[in-house]
Amino acid sequence: MAAHPKPRSAKRKRVDSAQNGEGRRERNKREKRGRIVAAARGLFQKQGYANTTVQQISKGAKIAAGTLFLYAKSKEDLLILVFTDEMMELIESAYLEIDPDLPFIEQVSALFKRFIAYHARDVDIARELIREITFLSNRDRASDLVAITQAILEKLVAFADRAVERRELDPGIDGAVLADCLFSIYYQQLQRWLSGYTTRRQFERNLAAMLALLIDSSRYRKR
Amino acid sequence: MAAHPKPRSAKRKRVDSAQNGEGRRERNKREKRGRIVAAARGLFQKQGYANTTVQQISKGAKIAAGTLFLYAKSKEDLLILVFTDEMMELIESAYLEIDPDLPFIEQVSALFKRFIAYHARDVDIARELIREITFLSNRDRASDLVAITQAILEKLVAFADRAVERRELDPGIDGAVLADCLFSIYYQQLQRWLSGYTTRRQFERNLAAMLALLIDSSRYRKR
DNA sequence: CCGAAAAAATGAACGCACTCATTTTCGTCA
DNA sequence: TGACGAAAATGAGTGCGTTCATTTTTTCGG
């Protein structure tokens, strides 16, 4: 590479930012976003979602109250800002940990169990988070959340495809529709648990029974 | 019946109220409750849930703002107050309208179609209502909402039982679990529609496919 | 390096859901 | 009938989420 003499001061900054594709503006925004996410997550966890005020969060992130609303459109929307990345990672890591040789129903159960364990760490937050994910208040996040759902469905379809190959599932079954069914059942029962309609124990029992019904009847049948 | 001389004035009131088991206090509360429900429903419908203030509702019901919170614990809780009765009636009337000789899947579809048509009258209100039903804010209403869910599940179980008798469904299937599955799928897709993730068309298509998958595989099988 | 325009941040002010100390209404019993 | 305690209603007050007119920071062409 040809070596240029080290550029100076003002000029330098411009070159640097051009190089890594990030100007002052973008870096500031990213840092601020990070501080907001950290402050919000910490406060939500320490004192609960309802008891945390946006004033506290903005103070914790060292920004003005109004600034916070440039990063999230509402207090509820903050939940999405804080937890989307974590949920995407959860989906991927949970999937990778599952033994691909397990029976279909056990793979599905294992995936959901990981999700349940994640939410169980803080049921109150999970409740608010799932509530906001389900009844989205900020349309701008729709694509992110569709991506999450899509990621989960993909994993379920992958399980189903492998199960069909193993002759465990009926090949006449549409994997995508089956995945939709499985996820709907999981998600619905999750909501009931988080909202206090059922205990975690009941939740897991019900879920197991429902998955068994659905999957048993999708089993491979000799022609 | 022995005729008593017509009692007079003050005394009369006491006797009357004792007879129909309703004192001034109870009557006042019932009337007030009715005015609140009427005012809230009207305003929600005319200008939407979010655009309606509790001040407007209390003015419409001719009571003080604070009084409203003796009847509903929050603005969201008002939705439950306003719509529970209507929903119970909907469930019963929808059930009665369904031809008991139809195939199982068509009975189930018909029930859900009635629910969908009901919510389609005002999607914004339905969204808020389902949101509040799902993530209940007032524990005191839990029993009412469990009753609603239970009522729906009962109908589904009734369909399933008849289908088993007709040899349409596998008798090995647990009707209650099947009903849970069916309702979970319906409810989950309902939420996606009301939240704007899918159109009504997509909703109905998806639902049909999912119900078909679940029910087809629960069909009667010769031993 | 300057100046102007765009983008981002600010924080005081606002609207609204909800509370609570006080007042009013109602049932009961002498 | 009147008086007393309990239940119900009141509405001004409070706290919090959200907005917006103004200020500050960043970009970029000349």
Image (cartoon, coloured by chain):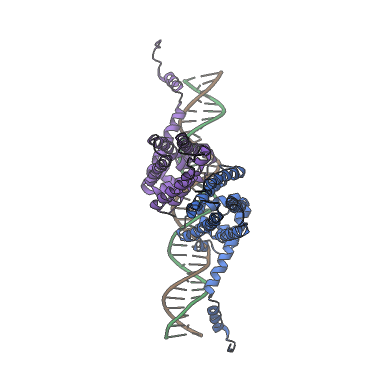
Chain colours: A blue, B purple, C brown, D green
Give percent across and percent down for residue A176.
48, 55
Give percent across and percent down for residue A73.
48, 59
* Residue farthest to the front, as pictured: A223
B25 or B175, nearer to the observer: B175
Left or right: A4 as drawn, with respect to B34: right
Left or right: B23 as drawn, with respect to A95: left
Q: Is residue B206 above or below residue A39?
A: above
Q: Is residue A51 visible?
A: no
Give percent across and percent down for residue A121.
63, 52
| Quadrant location of the N terminus of chain B in the rendered image | top left
A201 or B102, nearer to the observer: B102
Give percent across and percent down for residue B135.
52, 46
* Residue farthest to the top, as pictured: B2
What residue lies at 46% left-to-right and 35% top-to-bottom?
B158
A151 or A132, nearer to the observer: A151
Q: Is residue A91 visible?
A: yes
